[in-house]
Image: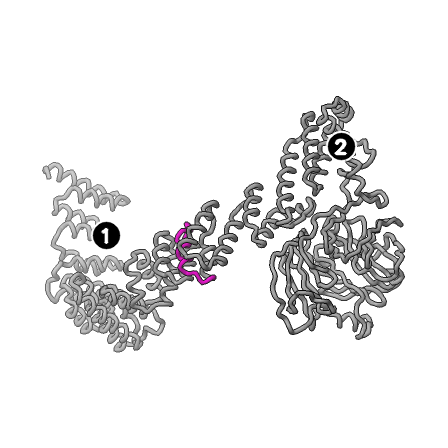
């Protein structure tokens, strides 16, 4: 009997069954759809209603001001606002994907109607009979396509082109168009009362002759198997043949197309027309003997303790898994909770006798149905079918719930489905801040933290940012203090003018990028002295600032060092600037840039002299400036850019090489060059220019302070053995004399000098240097033997 009562509500259209269950009785009062403009959101979304100002209606006790009201699908008022838009008549309304009402007023055309008129020869006064839109995911071009029914055919408009389909191809003048949910089929109502179904390439599938030639007020696809048409009081369902089903309504209705059917809104009820799923038909069809129907019947016998339950199970044992699956599927498509429970009990009963059935199917369906039943509650008013729920997805449903401020339900669904609850809790926290203007910051903080702690890793900074945008800066500062991630905490602290706290958090994090972010922010907002005082107390911030300023902001860094009394650091910067100035290509050939360089070094000298710990640097700066000045004068006088930035020794050698002995002597005197160093420098300079006569004369001026060794080494280095022989005999130390003779290849003289030194080790070294010369080696061996015999 239960099967009979369920199937009695169905309507047969060809070989398919359809049903029209009532989802809700509408709970609104005094709403007449015929007096209003109505926009209904898909996927069980809300209903927007506003009084139609194009109609003359009796107001009763209503205000003359029009109100835009939003109801859920059960007719419960969600929100309302006074319509304040005097600049044009309201033409229509629609909903965005985020379920935000989109209102269209007169004076605006979103489609380029003039363009197709010119190209296809449509008169300027001719308006389209109808319009439909094919979404981009269903078009070949990937663009939105708009179909316009005009007097002589259909115009297809997309971003790239305008096409015209003439009357001969489509079989008449089109007065109404509806596009199927998958974008593949068109239902066209013709001028002669025919309903023509074709694909988007305009190939005819079937036609149905309606009794009325007047175009229907509304037309929509019901799934992919039938088309609904509505006239004044008749709803006609047409299938793919000559069959049709009629429903009589004594009140206006609104079609709300869905992916698997059509919701029908009237003044008193919300109904859902859909094709009965195959699993449901197999169970509840009158006279059905399918395994699923027998399993459902077996449960009924089992509840009545009848032995026929076992008989039914025996009959379907081979097909029991399929029967269990059908019961689960049928339960998912049911809106009636008691029928869902019965079907799931039947599935569970059959599953007990199946050894190879995946047992988590029932659990998954139970979870899905609990979610669907929760949102179908009239208070929530989202009558989703299971197909709509799968297409919409759980995250989108949760997003719609939180937008409707159903945070508790959204949180429970997220927790139940094992999804991240952060989005729900954050939205609740932001909404709570916006709606709690009268609650003190400290009390509100405690309330919000109590909920935010439910979700680990939640962004306190995002909630704090919302508090700041809402004008509650103190609350924002208290919230951001709980943010564990410095990368999110520090930027927000800067945005709410908590620079000092931001600097503390950035330095504690040890992230140099964050520290620099705060430094640059404070740098731009505060006076220099205040900025210096702020970073001086933070070693990490101070060091990072100094590292940056050394590369890019020398002048600002000097101000910082002066403000903190670090004169030596300013001096080092000045000295560095002088070297950088010396690298300038213009800083040569007697350039006037040498003057500023000298002044910079002199300033560095003065600063160094003010600190007791930097006496060496002070003296070095003073002598550097003096040397640079002398070198500059030498370059000017000689017109040769070879002196600046060379050492004292190089300057002296260069002067001697150029024959400017007076200048060399001046440098020696100015910088107190020792006699030994002077002799070395002059000897090597004279040898470099090969002025042997001057070298010999210099050797005879007076006895050199370190002997004649520099003369010998300088001559040997330039391979002038003859000149070296002039000075080797003058070497006092026989060891030096022996080594000098060995360097110029004179073995006998080297051996004689070594014998005078009576040094066996020296003889061994000299023998090795003459290893290729057998005669020389024998001389050294003889001398070593003689020394050994003498016990030396």
Give the quadrant of residue 533. bottom left
Other-residue count near label 2 (Cα within 10 Å), few / some / many at <14 / 14–19 / ≥20? many
Residue 491 located left or right of residue 134: left
- Callout 2 secondary element: helix
Q: Which image quarter holds the N terminus? A: top right
* Nearer-N-terminus badge (2/1): 2
Rendered residue at 57%/41% (across/down): 416
Residue labelled with disc 1: 743
Task: Report x, y in % for residue 545.
Answer: 33, 61
What segment carries the magenta color?
469-487
Give the quadrant of residue 192. bottom right
Residue labelled with disc 2: 292
Nearer the camera: disc 2 or disc 1: 2
Residue 733 vertical placement versus 292 (above, below)? below
Examine the rendering and report whether any part of residue 143 can be seen. Answer: no
| Viewer-proximal residue among 304 and 631 | 304
Residue 328 located left or right of residue 556: right
Rendered residue at 43%/60% (across/down): 472
In the image, residue 479 lies in the stretch drawn in magenta: yes
């Amino acid at each position: 009997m239960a099967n009979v009562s369920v199937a009695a509500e169905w309507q047969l259209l060809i070989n398919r069954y359809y049903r029209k269950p009532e989802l809700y009785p509408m709970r609104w009062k005094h709403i007449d759809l015929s007096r209003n403009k109505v926009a209904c959101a898909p996927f069980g979304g809300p209903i927007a209603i506003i009084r139609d100002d194009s109609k003359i209606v009796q107001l009763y006790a209503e205000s003359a001001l029009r109100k835009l009201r939003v109801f859920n699908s059960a007719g419960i008022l969600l929100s309302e606002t006074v319509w304040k838009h005097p600049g044009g008549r309201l033409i229509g309304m629609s909903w965005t994907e985020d379920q935000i009402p989109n209102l269209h007023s007169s004076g605006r055309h979103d489609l380029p109607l003039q363009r197709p008129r010119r190209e296809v020869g449509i008169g300027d006064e001719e308006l389209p009979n109808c319009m439909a839109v094919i979404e981009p995911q269903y078009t070949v071009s990937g663009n939105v396509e708009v179909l316009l029914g005009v007097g002589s055919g259909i115009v297809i408009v997309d971003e790239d082109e305008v096409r015209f389909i003439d009357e001969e191809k489509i079989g008449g003048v089109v007065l109404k168009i509806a596009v199927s949910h998958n974008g593949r089929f068109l239902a066209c109502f013709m001028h002669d009362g025919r309903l023509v179904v074709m694909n988007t390439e305009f190939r005819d599938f079937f036609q149905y002759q309606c009794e009325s030639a007047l175009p229907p007020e509304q037309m929509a696809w019901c799934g992919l198997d039938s088309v609904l048409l509505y006239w004044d009081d008749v709803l006609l369902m047409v299938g793919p043949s000559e069959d049709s089903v009629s429903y009589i309504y004594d009140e206006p209705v609104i079609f709300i197309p869905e992916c698997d059917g059509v919701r029908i809104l009237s003044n008193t009820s919300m109904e859902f027309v859909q094709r009965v799923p195959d699993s449901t038909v197999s169970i509840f069809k009158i006279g059905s003997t399918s395994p699923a129907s027998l399993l459902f019947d077996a449960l009924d016998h089992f509840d009545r303790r009848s032995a026929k339950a076992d008989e039914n199970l025996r009959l379907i044992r081979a097909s029991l898994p399929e029967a269990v699956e059908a019961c689960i599927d049928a339960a998912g498509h049911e809106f009636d909770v008691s029928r869902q429970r019965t079907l799931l009990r039947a599935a569970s009963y059959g599953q007990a006798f199946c050894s190879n059935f995946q047992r988590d199917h029932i659990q998954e369906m139970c979870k899905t149905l609990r979610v669907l039943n929760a949102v179908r509650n009239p208070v929530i008013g989202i009558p989703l079918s299971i197909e709509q729920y799968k297409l919409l997805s759980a995250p989108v449903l949760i997003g719609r719930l939180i937008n409707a401020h159903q945070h508790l339900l959204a949180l429970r669904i997220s927790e139940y489905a094992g999804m991240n609850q952060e989005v729900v809790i954050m939205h609740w926290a932001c909404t709570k801040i916006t709606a709690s203007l009268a609650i003190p910051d400290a009390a509100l903080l405690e309330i919000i933290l109590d909920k935010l702690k439910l979700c680990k890793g939640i962004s306190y900074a995002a909630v704090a940012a919302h508090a700041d945008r809402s004008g509650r800066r103190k609350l924002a500062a208290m919230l951001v203090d709980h943010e564990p991630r410095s990368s999110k905490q520090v930027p927000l602290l800067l945005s709410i003018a908590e620079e000092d706290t931001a600097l503390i958090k950035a330095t504690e994090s040890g992230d140099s990028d964050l520290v620099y972010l705060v430094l640059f922010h404070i740098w731009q907002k505060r006076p220099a002295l205040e900025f210096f005082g702020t970073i001086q107390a933070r070693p990490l911030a101070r060091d990072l600032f100094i590292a940056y300023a050394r590369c890019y902001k020398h002048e600002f860094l000097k101000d910082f060092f002066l403000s903190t009394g670090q004169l030596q650091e300013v001096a080092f910067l000045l000295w560095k600037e002088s070297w950088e100035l010396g690298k300038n290509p213009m800083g040569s050939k007697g350039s006037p840039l040498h003057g500023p360089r000298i002044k910079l070094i002199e300033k560095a000298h003065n600063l160094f002299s003010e600190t007791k710990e930097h006496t060496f640097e002070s003296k070095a700066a003073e002598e550097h400036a003096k040397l640079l000045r002398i070198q500059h004068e030498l370059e000017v006088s000689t017109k040769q850019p070879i002196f600046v930035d060379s050492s004292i020794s190089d300057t002296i050698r260069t002067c001697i090489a150029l024959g400017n002995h007076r200048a060399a002597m001046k440098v020696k005197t100015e910088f107190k060059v020792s006699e030994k160093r002077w002799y070395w420098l002059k000897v090597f300079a004279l040898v470099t220019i090969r002025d042997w006569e001057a070298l010999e004369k210099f050797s005879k001026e007076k006895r050199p302070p370190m002997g004649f060794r520099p003369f010998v080494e300088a001559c040997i280095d330039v391979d002038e053995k003859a000149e070296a022989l002039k000075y080797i005999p003058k070497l006092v130390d026989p060891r030096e004399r022996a080594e000098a003779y060995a360097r110029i290849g004179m073995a006998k003289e080297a051996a004689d000098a070594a014998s005078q030194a009576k040094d066996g080790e020296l003889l061994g070294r000299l023998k090795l240097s003459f290893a290729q010369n057998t005669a020389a080696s024998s001389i050294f061996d003889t001398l070593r033997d003689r020394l050994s015999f003498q016990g030396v």
